[in-house]
Amino acid sequence: RWMGYRLIAVDGSNLALVNTPSLQANFGGQSNQNSSFVQAKTFYHYDVLNDLVTHACIAPYRTSELTLASHWIEELPVDSIAIYDRYYSTFKMFALHSWQESERKFVIRAKDSLEFVKRFLKTGKVSQVIELAPTQASISGLRQSGFATDSSTRIRIRLVRVELQSTTEVIATNLWQEEGFENDMFGDLYFRRWGVETNISKLKNTMQMESFSGLTVESVEQDFYATVM
């Protein structure tokens, strides 16, 4: 554990499938005038300190990783810190972690293009607690997840500046300084997210996850979960 918490890195990936009518109908893919391919979306919660997948699922290719991430937040252990890359830096993700019956802790790299990130960087501060208002997309997305929100809704998050050799990253989190989470902890903490990338590579390359034993939806699903197990 890290300061008493499990560290759960969260990420998704794609799996190449054989182009058969049944797999195309279930998982989908892409096609143009020259070719087509069939793929599935996979999604993982990975305990980086114990080298253990704690949750995995396989879904149709067009399923958004954000949809999968928001759907499985309540599966995160209460005593965990979930670590995400910048693709997941949305108001909805911040809110769903904070509004669970038992709050889930998160560390998410924020997108440089977000206005609140730009404002924070201009301050020159290393850390700042801010209040965020939802966008219309966030209001709609949260309503679909069962949370009634409007333009007056606010959530508190902490932003932490992490200086690297060639760039500056901003971390969004609900780990507070008064709880003992100092600014200089977040660079190393976020870097641990790479464990899930390494595990996905191992599943695909070492474990040969894409070498399926059958051409049915059931065999693909069985092979996926067996390989993860």
Image: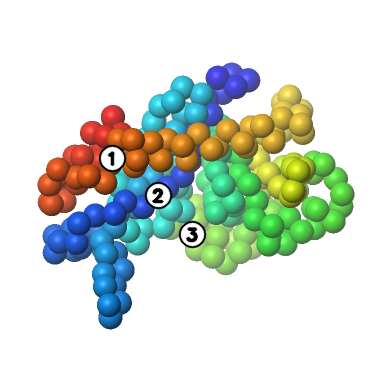
Tag 1 and tag 3, C-beta contact below 8 Å: no
Position of residue 208 in the picture relative to residue 213 (left or right): right
Give residue 188's position: percent from left, percent from top.
66, 32
Q: Which residue corresponds to mark 1? A: 208
Q: Considering depth in this image, is 189 or 200 the residue closer to the camera? A: 200
CA gap, disc 3 and disc 2 = 22 Å
Query: Closer to the camera, 34 or 160?
Result: 34
Residue shown at the point (31%, 68%) measured from the top left: 30
SS under mark 3: helix
Query: Is residue 175 among the parts visible in the rendering?
Result: yes
Could you tell me the amino acid type at mark 2? Ser
Is disc 2 surrounded by few (<14), some (14 to 19) or many (20+) residues within 10 Å?
some
Q: Residue at x 59, y 51 (%)?
A: 86
Colour mapping used in the image: rainbow
Above or below, comparing residue 49 to residue 37 in the picture:
above
How far apart are the alpha carbons under marks 1 and 3?
36 Å
Lower sequence index among marks 1 and 3 = 3
Count of numbered badges drawn on the protein: 3
Find disc 2 in the rendering and name its residue: 13
Residue 113 image position (x, y, % from top left): 68, 62
Residue 182's place in the image compared with 83, above or below, is: above
Q: Which residue sits at x=26%, y=46%?
A: 210
Residue found at the very far bottom of the displayed protein = 33
How many C-alpha atoms fall within 10 Å of the one at disc 3: few (<14), some, or many (≥20)?
some
Q: What label sits on residue 141 in the rendered view?
A: 3
Which numbered disc flags the more N-terminal residue, 2 or 1? 2
Left or right for 220, reference 4 = left
Horizontal side, residue 111 vs residue 16: left or right: right
- Nearest the camera: 63 or 51? 51
